[in-house]
């Protein structure tokens, strides 16, 4: 009989969001009159911007006409979108990234998850803790994580980010990771790194021959000047970093699906003979074999995001979410809670009061305030004692949730 990839058996069930849903449903069954506000949502709530909608309508019409029909597109993405990204997200910001270093995809989850395909099985992987779970689970699938001891994988290097270190990951002692996942602005903590703080990691990677996988899915939320929009703003990063971006949170494409990955020609890994091999070439090879391109319609929609109207419209939507985050930050701080993040990200990270665990705080908020969020411990051991609320909601619900929390304090 055939065998399976046993690494998948190592993975525990993804219980965080199902347990959240189970507890909310049980509460609602017991209290049918309760109006529970869900502040755990990691998905956008505003509709797509008119510029993208219009472009996609036109693209659908293109598909209905023999002269403008598009079948399979280039696996790397259409030049119209790769060029627009290179120009607006990089060149206009003084960063020298070329179109052929940009690979369009159906989103950053697939790309961050798949990138390990082109990396050796023995690389030592480091993640910040708490973390977006895709980085860890996909390394478990490919056998790089070792075994699960309690809630930590034996072969993964965890870089705790907590209030104690100001949510800045510190260089690990006694081990040199080969592959370092950094996500800024961060999910789940909503915190950021300054240029100087990110430079420490770029210099470390250059010195040790490590690769940084930089996830900037929340780049559009950056408002503060000292927060880099791209890792390539840091000198030397083009030799040691791959950057993942997405139109999901930038432009509401969570349902449409479009993202991209930047793999500079200058990022080199070593093969088993010690010879240098370019990651751009390998990623291209991987994509051409396993991926047939993002849809023409979604790429036209993404292109429209870069028009002046598109830029204005997506900024208005992101500003709306950031205002929700501000309402939470200010209101919850006034209520005496310690709050973090939320200034350049749609996530507010709360220190659970009175020594409560993440799940105790979850139950308390649900029962006393009828507000549901996400327990920080679900994102990693260093998330214990923290709690995530998201700005993806209406302003009215956000104000009401803050009012309820304030009143029970
Ligand atoms: N990266 C991070 C850090 C995320 O939080 C998310 C989605 O929540 C993604 C990537 C996935 O983005 P996409 O919708 O482009 O797959």
Image: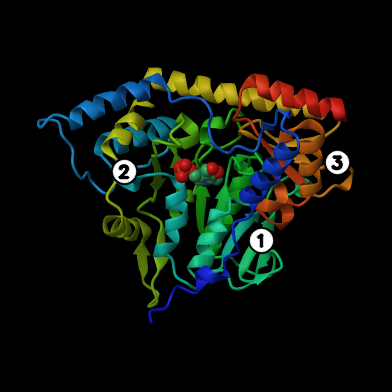
For residue 294, which numbered disc appears in the image?
A: 2
- Image color mode: rainbow
Residue sitting nearer the eye, 321 or 262: 321
Q: Do the residues bearing badges 3 and 2 touch, measured as CB atoms within 8 Å?
A: no
Total numbered labels: 3
Task: Work out whether 335 lies above or below 199.
Answer: above
Say if disc 3 is inside 8 Å of ligand 1.
Answer: no
Residue 103 showing in the rendered view: yes
Query: Which of marks 1 and 3 precedes in the sequence?
Result: 1
For residue 158, which numbered disc appears in the image?
A: 1
What kind of element bears circle 2?
Answer: loop
How packed mark 1 is, by other alpha carbons closer than 10 Å (few <14, some 14-19, many 20 or more), is many
Q: Position of residue 162 (x, y in %)?
A: 75, 49
Circle nearer the viewer, 2 or 1: 2
For residue 353, which numbered disc appears in the image?
A: 3
What kind of element bears circle 1?
Answer: strand
Q: Please state if 325 lies on the left or on the right of 275 as rendered.
A: right
Q: Do the residues bearing badges 2 and 1 touch, measured as CB atoms within 8 Å?
A: no
């Amino acid at each position: 009989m055939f065998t399976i990839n046993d690494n998948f058996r190592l993975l525990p069930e993804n219980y965080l969001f199902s347990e959240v849903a189970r507890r909310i449903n049980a509460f609602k069954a017991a209290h049918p009159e309760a109006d529970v506000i869900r502040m755990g949502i990691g998905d956008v709530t505003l509709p797509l911007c008119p510029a993208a909608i219009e472009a996609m309508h036109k693209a659908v019409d293109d598909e209905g006409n023999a002269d403008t029909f598009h079948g399979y597109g280039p696996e790397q993405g259409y030049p119209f979108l790769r060029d627009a990204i290179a120009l607006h997200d990089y060149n206009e910001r003084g960063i020298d990234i070329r179109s052929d270093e940009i690979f369009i995809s159906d989103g950053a989850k697939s790309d961050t998850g798949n990138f390990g395909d082109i990396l050796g099985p023995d690389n030592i992987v480091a993640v910040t803790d708490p973390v977006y779970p895709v980085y860890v689970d996909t390394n478990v699938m490919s056998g790089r994580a070792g075994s699960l001891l309690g809630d930590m994988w034996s072969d993964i290097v965890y870089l705790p980010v907590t209030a104690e270190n100001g949510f800045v990951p510190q260089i690990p002692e006694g081990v040199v990771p080969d592959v370092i996942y950094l996500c800024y602005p961060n999910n789940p903590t909503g915190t950021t790194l300054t240029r100087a703080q990110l430079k420490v990691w770029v210099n470390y990677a250059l010195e040790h021959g490590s690769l940084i996988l930089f996830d900037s899915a929340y780049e559009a939320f950056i408002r503060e000047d000292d927060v880099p929009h791209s890792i390539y703003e840091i000198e030397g990063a083009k030799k040691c970093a791959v950057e993942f971006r997405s139109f999901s949170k930038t432009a509401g494409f969570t349902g449409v699906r479009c993202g991209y990955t930047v793999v500079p020609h200058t990022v080199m890994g070593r093969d088993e003979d010690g010879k240098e091999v370019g990651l751009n070439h390998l990623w291209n090879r991987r994509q051409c074999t396993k991926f047939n391109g993002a849809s023409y319609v979604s790429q036209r929609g993404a292109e429209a995001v870069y028009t002046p109207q598109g830029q204005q419209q997506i900024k208005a939507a992101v500003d709306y979410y950031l205002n929700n985050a501000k309402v939470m930050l200010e209101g919850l701080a006034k209520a005496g809670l310690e709050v973090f993040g939320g200034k350049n990200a749609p996530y507010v990270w709360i220190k659970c009061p009175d020594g409560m665990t993440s799940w105790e705080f979850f139950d308390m908020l649900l029962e006393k305030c009828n507000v549901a969020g996400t327990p920080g411990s679900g994102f990693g051991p260093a998330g214990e004692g923290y709690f995530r609320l998201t700005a993806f909601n209406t302003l009215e619900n956000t104000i009401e949730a803050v009012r309820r929390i304030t009143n029970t304090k």
